[in-house]
Image: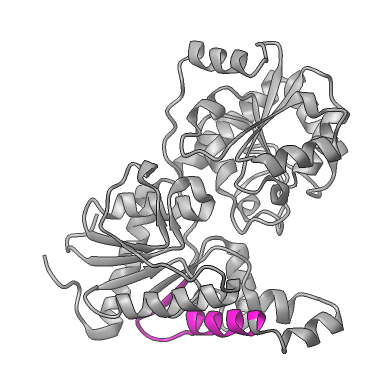
Amino acid sequence: MAEHKLKIAFVVDRFGGRFGGAEAYGVELMRELAQSHDVTVFAREYDNESGLRLPFVPIRTRKGFPSWLRVLWFAARARRLTQSGFDIVHSHMNGWCGDVEVVHVTPVRYNWRVRKISFIKWLLSFASPRVQTYLALERKRVRQRAGHRAVAVSGLIAEQLNSAYGGEVEAYPVIAPGVVPAAQLPDEQSHALRESLGWGQEDYVCLLVARNPQRKDLNTVLQALVHLPTNVKLLVVGGNASTRDYIRRNAPSVAERVKTVDETSDVTPYYSCADAYVHPTLNDSFGMAPLEAMSYELPVILSPSPWCGFAQYVTPNIDALVLSHPENNEELAEFIQQLMASSTLHEQLVRGGRKLVQRHSWSEVARRYEALYAEILQERDGRVASSK
């Protein structure tokens, strides 16, 4: 870690791994950085179950306001609260407060000005206060200048930023998420969890972890189940009442083979009791869950790029099985059958995933950010840190 102690303001909507992949990125990165630096969190909400106790400054937004006004209010408050007293402001939010702005999702300008949309939708966007606010905030956020960096969490996001705002792709450094070394449950505990779900050891359990399972294309997994033997089950972690209703409406013939678990910060038991991880996502700038699944030595099936940015880091059939399209449920079913039938394929994917995990440690991610902080401070005013 760094020799010099920095005062870092970390700005995020919600601080806690249970809120999603982008949020988990922030928690684990700050867990590493807080070992050598003073980190203060600015957020709407702080999950005390994250296992990390840091100074916290709440940024409340006005209930009842439309989403774009809440985002604007948050951005303005974050700027006011962090504009002095910190060496580095590290932001994961749309706005203009950060020295480091980490972009986790497809850029707004890419969606509205680069990607092909209907002429009517394009025209109406100019009269939309929501779209115009998001565009203006993002323009401030990614504007290239000395002492500032817009960081992409995947090569896909860097390419989209380049398409939307110009400049070289290298102008948007890519720092992909890391992964926490997995702590497997003892076999007897994972077996007991299966039994509590009504499943036995003869069942083949596919796992999907998502705050919004529908966006990870839950429907494709449900339709794949229709083509698979009845001993193939699906466990959805992050599903709520609306997810359960969605399953009953869209796949009544396999609904009894699907179990849902509410959002939780402790996913270890569920990874430990699964046989494979399925991730036919429709939109992931990176996709932390497949990497996390690999740390638990699960074989992974995932969407290709551009639907899943993590696919750019994967060698098909070596590290993971990669679908030709996220909505190809027959191919997904075929891949699951291949894993069930071939222990050789299963072990190959586990070995490949293990090597991929070793290249994505959070300590290495933190080291890269520290190097970026040093560059920013040098460009800005020639100093390295406020204190030692």
Q: Nearer the viewer, residue 360 or 222?
A: 222
Q: Nearer the viewer, residue 107 or 339?
A: 107
Q: Nearer the viewer, residue 307 or 352?
A: 307
Quadrant of the rendering where the N terminus is positioned: bottom left
In this rendering, is residue 179 above or below 78?
Answer: above
38 inside magenta stretch: no
Instruction: Locate residue 298, reporting x and y percent.
Output: 59, 30
- Tell whether 361 sits left or right of 324: left
Residue shown at 31% from the left, 46% from the top: 52
Can residue 302 be seen in this snapshot? yes
Residue shown at 81% from the left, 42% from the top: 220
The span picked out in magenta is 130-150
- Tell whether 195 sits left or right of 137: right
Circle count: 0
Instruction: Locate residue 7, reporting x and y percent.
Output: 22, 67
In this rendering, is residue 166 above or below 247?
Answer: below
Q: Nearer the viewer, residue 283 or 362?
A: 283
Can residue 98 be seen in this snapshot? no
- Tell whether 127 sits left or right of 378: right
- Tell whether 274 sits left or right of 305: left
Residue shown at 65% from the left, 49% from the top: 212
Instruction: Locate residue 147, reporting x and y percent.
Output: 34, 81
In this rendering, is residue 3 above or below 223?
Answer: below
149 inside magenta stretch: yes
Q: Quadrant of residue 285?
A: bottom right
